[in-house]
Image (cartoon, rainbow, N blue to C red):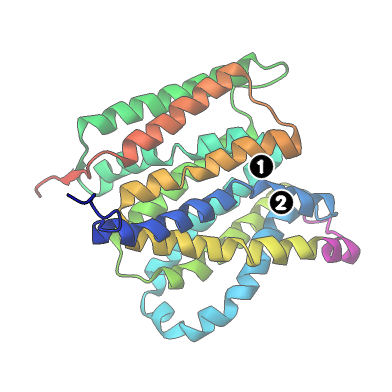
């Protein structure tokens, strides 16, 4: 008897292969997000100006898309603004966190998102999570507590500094945005994309004003030096990678997408020590492992059921 033909795989397995590879690679690019942000700052677009620039330049690039889809935008403008506000605030806080805390602490604390998503799904979507998700939430909060303990033990450090709090707030707001996207899934993600960049730039501008950095506008030479990073990475790289992640979520199962997007943690974990020389302590690695474990357990658990009205 001849050996089974290795090419005779299920159609779904073949269909999932390339989307899975693309989502894994695209999400990994977010693990390098901190690097061009700091290069923009080093070019002279300093502090919160770098955060504003990282969202304002892509927003300008998205204006033609918004113009082409203005009919669809206006049809759902209220919902698009609400969703865009939550997601945009999350993006702005995520970028701000890199300025005030380490790369890995920002990335790991942001990946508490699955925990917040489960809690919000229970509150707003009347979901009944499986017992595995309760375990995932407990593990995630244990990781957060250990991360706080690591911060408290660090010399001249608080349990959670401003950057840590920004990362946690970003994960919570992103989770709210995710719940809204799931609740109003009839809205095209292409219409939400310009809105989230608009609100990210708006919140970055507000943070700039509140921090008193608005009077310290970068010089034109600094903008010129930073523009290759702003266009080359934040427009050319990040916009397509975000689209790939969104498109991949439409083609493959949500659980697989969630696990594949953990490549961001992997890339951040490799790039931060090599490029920035940032190292986590042993207790921070323990906290990070618990947070990642919680995320993997949460996204690999069967979908929560809805309670009867």
Name the image quarter holding residue 80: bottom left
Cβ–Cβ under 8 Å for marks 2 and 1? yes
Mark 2 surroundings within 10 Å by alpha-carbon count, few (fewer than 14), some (14 through 19), many (20 or more): many
Question: From the viewer's perspective, is 149 left or right of 191?
Answer: right
Query: Does 27 appear above or below 272?
Result: below
Give whichever of discs 2 and 1 has the lower sequence position: 2
- Residue drawn at (55%, 23%), measured in percent from left and top? 285
- Residue drawn at (66%, 42%), measured in percent from left and top? 98
User: Which segment is the magenta one?
Assistant: 212-225
Name the image quarter holding residue 56: bottom right
Label drawn at residue 37: 2
Residue that protrudes farthest toward the front in the picture? 1
In the image shown, does 168 or 208 lie closer to the viewer? 168
The image position of residue 167, as x and y in percent, is: 56, 39
The image position of residue 25, as x and y in percent, is: 52, 53
Is 223 covered by the magenta stretch?
Answer: yes
Residue that protrudes farthest toward the left in the picture? 308
- Residue drawn at (27%, 29%), measured in percent from left and top? 134
Distance in Å between CA atoms under marks 2 and 1: 8 Å
Q: Is residue 212 visible?
A: no
Mark 1 surroundings within 10 Å by alpha-carbon count, few (fewer than 14), some (14 through 19), many (20 or more): many
Query: Does 80 appear above or below 156?
Result: below
- Residue underneath mark 1: 98
Q: Is residue 287 visible?
A: yes
The image position of residue 28, as x and y in percent, is: 55, 49
What secondary structure is found at the residue carrying circle 1? helix
């Amino acid at each position: 008897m001849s050996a089974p033909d290795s090419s005779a795989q299920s159609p779904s397995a073949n269909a999932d292969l390339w989307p899975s590879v693309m989502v894994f690679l695209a999400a990994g690019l977010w693990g390098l997000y901190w690097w061009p942000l700091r290069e923009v700052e080093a070019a002279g677009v300093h502090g919160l100006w770098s955060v504003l620039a990282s969202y304002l330049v892509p927003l300008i690039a998205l204006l033609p898309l918004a113009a082409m889809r203005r009919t669809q935008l206006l049809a759902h403008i209220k919902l698009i603004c609400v969703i865009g506000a939550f997601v945009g605030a999350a993006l702005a806080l995520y970028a701000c966190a890199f300025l005030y805390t380490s790369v890995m602490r920002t990335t790991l604390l942001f990946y508490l998102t699955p925990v917040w998503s489960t809690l919000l799904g229970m509150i707003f979507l009347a979901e009944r999570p499986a017992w595995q998700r309760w375990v995932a939430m407990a593990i995630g909060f244990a990781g957060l507590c250990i991360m706080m303990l690591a911060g408290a033990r660090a010399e001249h450090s608080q349990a959670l500094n401003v950057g840590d709090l920004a990362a946690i707030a970003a994960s919570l707001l992103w989770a709210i945005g995710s719940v809204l996207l799931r609740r109003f899934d009839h809205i095209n993600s292409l219409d939400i994309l310009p809105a989230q960049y608009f609100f990210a730039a708006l919140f970055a501008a507000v943070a700039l004003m509140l921090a008193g950095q608005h009077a310290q506008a970068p010089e034109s030479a600094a903008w010129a030096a930073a523009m290759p990073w702003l266009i080359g990475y934040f427009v050319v790289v990040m916009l397509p990678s975000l689209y790939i992640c969104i498109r991949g979520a439409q083609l493959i199962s949500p659980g697989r997408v969630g696990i594949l997007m953990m490549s961001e943690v992997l890339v951040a974990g490799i790039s931060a020590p090599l490029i920035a020389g940032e190292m986590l302590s042993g207790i921070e690695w323990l906290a990070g492992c618990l947070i990642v474990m919680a995320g993997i357990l949460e996204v690999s658990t069967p979908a929560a059921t809805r309670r009867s009205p």
